[in-house]
Amino acid sequence: MRVLLVGAGGVGGAITRIAARRPFFDAMVVADHDPGRSEAAVAELGGDARFTAAQVDAGDEPAVARLLARHRCDVLLNATDPRFVMPLFRAARAAGAAYVDMAMSLSRPHAERPYEECGVKLGDEQFAQAAGWEKEGVLALVGMGVEPGLSDVFARYAADELFDEIEEIGIRDGANLTVDGYGFAPSFSIWTTIEECLNPPVVYEAGRGWFTTEPFSEAEVFDFPEGIGEVECVNVEHEEVLLVPRWVDTRRVTFKYGLGREFVETLKTLHLLGLDRTEPVTVPGPDGPVAVSPRDVVAACLPDPATLGERMHGKTCAGTWVRGVRDGKPREVYLYHVVDNQWSMAEYGCQAVVWQTAVNPVVALELLASGAWSGAGVLGPEAFPARPFLDLLTAYGSPWGMREQ
């Protein structure tokens, strides 16, 4: 397998460190718009000849397609933010390469009823091209991070091995992470966090389909395992709600994120001030007016999440809560994956949230390389057998858990 990794930021850098320990691929080209970042990511690997640095603009589809062809890559792994999903998705298809991402194409709220009806849903642009990918016999594996990604694998595992009927699947994400010296320091991309948290959350119900609610709705307290404890979780827009019902028979799907009240209030303030906007505004500059995106300014003012590991303490938990029936009796379980920041920093030099996101696409690539996973078209993680993934994740030194509720 020959891989083009686009994006050498926090997650991209963690991907290279994890992949370097595995023998399943022949080459990985690490590309970024900033050649210094891709070169640094490769230099950290101690001379592993399988890795090569390159420069590319993720929004330049022809350039990405040429890079795929030049290095004879058969798969493109997208480690950029969601703005670049569609250009990279199209570039991979143009080059005849398989495609893997950790998030899906962006949504757009309904123009008149944003908190009741869906407009353009996450992944709609990609699924609109599914027939073409399938006809060409090429795979686009979408939403293959941790959430979405591992959470979807858990949903498939529950359907295949734990339940006869499923009433509800709820993704529940929580942490007890703290960062020394910062009052507000998100552990993941603030650009993506704003997109997820301030868009109308999506819920799925059988018979009704997908619909939306108000941001931060339906608060509940969820008790997370391995010492994290109780965290208030709220509805957030996320890809699992759009993916799970396509392959798993369930009556309801939700995603709730343990943000904490202070984090929620900060996001609400950003929205109130218009600082969540992506459309450029004109501001004075030393050489005249400059057009800038308010959200990009917010991101630039905050610390890079990938650099926070030394200051970070605690654990992060991604998981899938499932309620249903087994052998005629009610059953409720929580399938989860916890990463301790102290462990991920000591073992890989990566903070916990970044490492947890990065490990899952590497596991998926290895399954594709071995043939344990195969397919064509635009498919989510639920379209594949769960057991090979969970077994390999454990073999990577990061086991998952299950708690009867």
Image: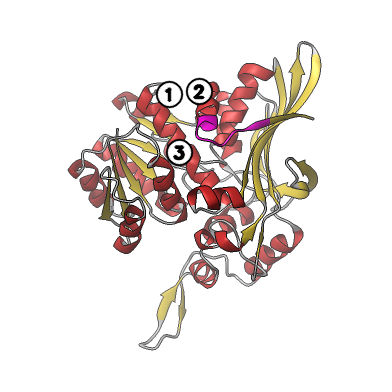
> Toward the viewer: 308 or 254?
308
Q: Secondary structure at mark 2?
A: helix
Give whichever of discs 1 and 3 has the lower sequence position. 3
**Amino acid type of the residue that numbered disc 2 sits on in the rendered structure:** Pro
The residue at the point 59 percent across, 57 percent down is 187
Q: Is residue 194 above or below residue 225?
A: below
Side (left or right) of 351 relative to 232: left
Residue 396 x %, y %: 50, 34
Residue 65 x %, y %: 24, 45
The residue at the point 59 percent across, 25 percent down is 156
Query: Would you say residue 118 sits in the magenta stretch?
Result: no
Residues rendered magenta in the picture = 393-401
The residue at the point 63 percent across, 57 percent down is 198
The reply to whether residue 107 is visible in this rendering is no
Residue position marked by numbered label 2 in the rendering:
388
The residue at the point 54 percent across, 53 percent down is 345
Query: Which one is closest to the eye, mark 2 or mark 1?
Result: 2
Residue 83 x %, y %: 44, 54
Q: Secondary structure at mark 3?
A: helix
Q: Is residue 234 above or below residue 33?
A: above
Query: On the image, which quarter does residue 324 sit in?
Result: top right
Residue position marked by numbered label 1 in the rendering:
373
Residue 361's mark?
Answer: 3
Residue 337 x %, y %: 63, 38
**Amino acid type of the residue that numbered disc 3 sits on in the rendered structure:** Pro
Query: What number of labels is visible?
Result: 3
Q: Are marks 2 and 1 in contact (CB under 8 Å)?
A: yes
The alpha-carbon separation of the residues under discs 1 and 3 comes to 13 Å
Query: Would you say residue 397 sits in the magenta stretch?
Result: yes
- Split into 4 quadrants, where in the image is the N terminus? top left
Q: Secondary structure at mark 1?
A: loop
Q: Is residue 300 above or below residue 342?
A: below
